[in-house]
Image (cartoon, rainbow, N blue to C red):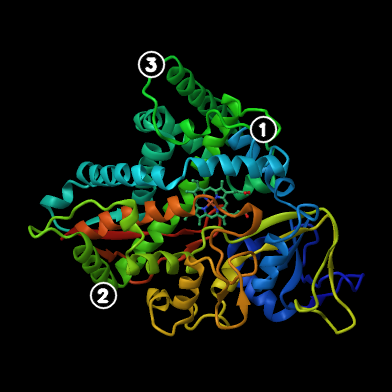
Amino acid sequence: QQVALPKDPSLPPVVFHYIPWFGSAAYYGMDPYKFMFECRDRYGDVFTFILLGRRMTVALGPKGNNLSLGGKSTHVSAEDAYTHLTTPVFGKGVVYDCPNDMLMQQKKFIKHGLTTEALQSYAELMVKEARAFFANHLKATKESGPVKVNALETMADMVVLSASRTLQGKEVRDSMSTRFAKLLEDLDKGFTPLNFMFPNLPLPSYRRRDRAQKEMSDFYLSIMEKRRSGEHDHEHDMIAALQGSVYRNGVALTDRDIAHMMIAILMAGQHTSSATSSWFLLHLAHNTELADKLYAEQVKFFGNPDGSFRDMTYEETKTLPLMDACIRETLRLHAPIHSIYRAVKQDIPVPPSLSAPSESQTYVIPKGHFIVAAPGVSQMDPKIWDNATEWKPSRWLEDGGVAKAANEQYQAGEKVDYGFGVVSKGTESPYQPFGAGRHRCVGEQFAYLQLTVLVAEVIRNYKLKLVADEFPKTNYQTMIVLPLDPYITLERR
Ligand code: HEM
């Protein structure tokens, strides 16, 4: 590769490419991390690459994350970057199909459905779902020896069942085995990198996406109507939490808005949590010593004298050091979202501390580019983490370990010092699997609860082993970073 300098020296360097419009699409699409680490070595923390005609400027490291995720809404826009992908799937009027200020208020409404009280009741329901899942679906393991399963598919099923029983509500859970699952599949197939690059192609999958969106939205409307008419019990779920929410200007959420927000929540949590929990299981299957320690933690906290386990409460899910460290470490190595995009609406000056070519000259990321944050790069940066590519939960537990200290400070809401300069709980951080700034995830606590309950249920009942000799490779061809060939065996303990 050579450096193709832009004509204007105030612009970041452009990654060399052979085909003008196509640019670096193939390399970035195949392995975005390898691409970005290599580009960093060659061009520094800030560089531009061409992606099917778009100019994507990557800003790496904690300061780069801050530039994008902490950017002012006058300078960077998530809605301009994503609406063509998300609006056909979620529906109109919400998330990125409305002004940013409305999304901020919608996120507050969602938080009302995720109070401690709500999470306590969700914990109970999740435990029941997880137990029933294994009782129904993996009965075979009781009679025969180890059973081969696809960890990703298994966890995706558990995630959707547990999320539907809790956040989504009883009616959604009850229809999970019927039409709803098919609608979800069709929506999923409309939520791919292809849809991101080409919002409107005359393909059957696009038509199925649009039909599924309409049918699912109507389904949520019918739930709300039935609840109002007293035909259904009123549940303490997200639909109930959203009903009656009113924007600051006095306008209430309509049923249609709520339906579309419910679809957005479903999509936001499904693949992120399935991917994370399946990577987690794969690491346990690979590192059986650690799996035994995690089992011992379950026995210590929840074991009954007869060898059975008691159910855990929401509060208890937050007191398990090893479980917590494993989740943190899995999200460090396998951040489900490898690139976070924003459309640049006004020129962004790049601070001199971030890759200035010389003392007298700094870069500007111009209006019209996309700015790309890749928290996964700083999460795997060998300059920041010891044995950066190794799955090592102990780094979050060891005394004197920077990750442990940082974690404790973070939990206490303090400024976090990762040992290489003070970073805050905010946007300038090397660890951001849930994003940062105004678009930060509102589902983190729910996700932690779900991951803890589901993985605990697996580890309490089964010994895990990888089927292949090698640890599974990564699939970057999907919107969410997924494991390839994620096969494990489950053997009843
Ligand atoms: C935003 C990750 C689970 C709802 C985000 C963002 C990330 C993220 C990186 C920031 C996106 C951006 O800046 O453009 C994750 C991970 C999860 C997870 C790793 C699980 C392991 C969930 C769940 C829910 C949820 C369970 C719903 C309960 C949302 C919402 C946003 C968001 C509403 C805000 C989008 C915005 O403001 O633009 N998530 N998420 N997420 N997430 Fe999550």
Residue, x 52% and y 80% (percent of image)?
385
Dot 1 amino acid type: Gly
Instruction: Give the answer, above or below, for where 288 lies relative to 118.
Output: below
Crowd class of label 1 (few under 14; some 14 to 19; many from 20; radius 10 Å)? some
User: Which part of the image, by quadrant, shows the N terminus?
Assistant: bottom right
* For the residues bearing labels 2 and 1, Cβ distance under 8 angstroms: no
Q: Which residue is mark 2?
A: 289
Residue 231's tag is 3
Q: CA distance from mark 2 to mark 3?
A: 52 Å
Using residue 133 as the reference point, say whether residue 354 is left or right of it. right
Q: In terms of sequence position, does the residue under pointer 1 or pointer 3 come before the other?
A: 1
Residue type at tag 2: Glu
Q: Is residue 69 visible?
A: yes
Does residue 215 sit above or below 299 in this rendering? above
Q: Circle 1 is placed at which residue position?
A: 93
Number of the front mark, 1 or 3: 3
- Tell us which disc is closer to us: 2 or 3: 3
Vertical position of residue 64 compared to residue 167: above or below:
below
Does residue 361 appear to the left or right of 52 in the view shown? right
Label drawn at residue 435: none
Mark 2 → mark 1, Cα distance in angstroms: 50 Å
Can residue 189 be seen here? The reply is no
Q: Nearer the viewer, residue 283 or 104?
A: 104
Question: In the rendered structure, are the residues bearing label 2 and label 3 in contact, judged by CB atoms less than 8 Å apart?
Answer: no
Instruction: Tell whether 383 sits left or right of 283.
Output: right
Seen from the viewer's position, the closer of residues 136 and 241 is: 241
Q: Measuring from the top left, give residue 471's x and y in whole percent.
A: 38, 69
Could you say whether the residue bearing mark 2 is in a helix, strand or loop?
helix
Q: Say whether residue 213 is left or right of residue 222.
A: right
Residues at marks 1 and 3, CA–CA distance in whole angstroms: 28 Å
